[in-house]
């Protein structure tokens, strides 16, 4: 049971980092699009 818990915790941490990277990438893309639209 404890082994499963440790595995789940490690997976959760990895998943959190993955989500954070996706979020930052999405933010970057949105900012880039905004800049392109604001350019004359």
Image (tube, rainbow, N blue to C red):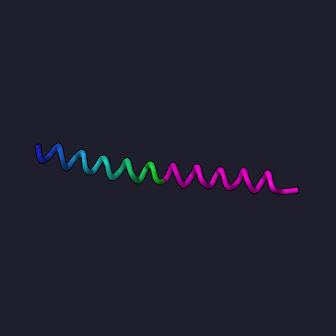
Q: What span is in magenta?
A: 21-40
Question: In what quadrant of the picture does the C terminus appear?
Answer: bottom right
Q: Is residue 7 left or right of residue 33?
A: left
Does the stretch in magenta take in 15? no
The residue at 25%/50% (across/down) is 9
Residue 19 horizontal/vertical position (percent): 45, 49
Question: Where on the picture, by quarter, is residue 35?
Answer: bottom right
Left or right: 33, with 4 as reference point: right
Count the marks: 0
Q: Position of residue 34 (x, y in %)?
A: 73, 53
Q: Quadrant of the N terminus?
A: top left
Across and down, in percent, residue 16 comes to 38, 51
Report the side of 27 relative to 18 (left or right): right
Q: Is residue 34 above or below residue 8?
A: below
Residue located farthest toward the right when viewing the structure as drawn: 40
- The residue drawn where x is 30% and y is 47% is 11
User: What secondary structure characterizes most of the magenta part?
Assistant: helix
Q: Tell which of 38 and 12 is nearer to you.
A: 38
Assess whether residue 27 is covered by the magenta stretch: yes
Which residue is rendered at x = 64% and y = 51% of the image? 29
Find residue 4 and report its image quarter: top left
Q: Residue at x 33, y 52 (%)?
A: 13
Across and down, in percent, residue 3 comes to 14, 46
């Amino acid at each position: 049971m404890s082994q499963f818990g440790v595995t789940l915790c490690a997976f959760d941490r990895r998943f959190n980092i993955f989500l954070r990277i996706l979020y930052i990438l999405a933010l970057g893309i949105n900012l880039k699009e905004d800049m392109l639209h604001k350019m004359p």
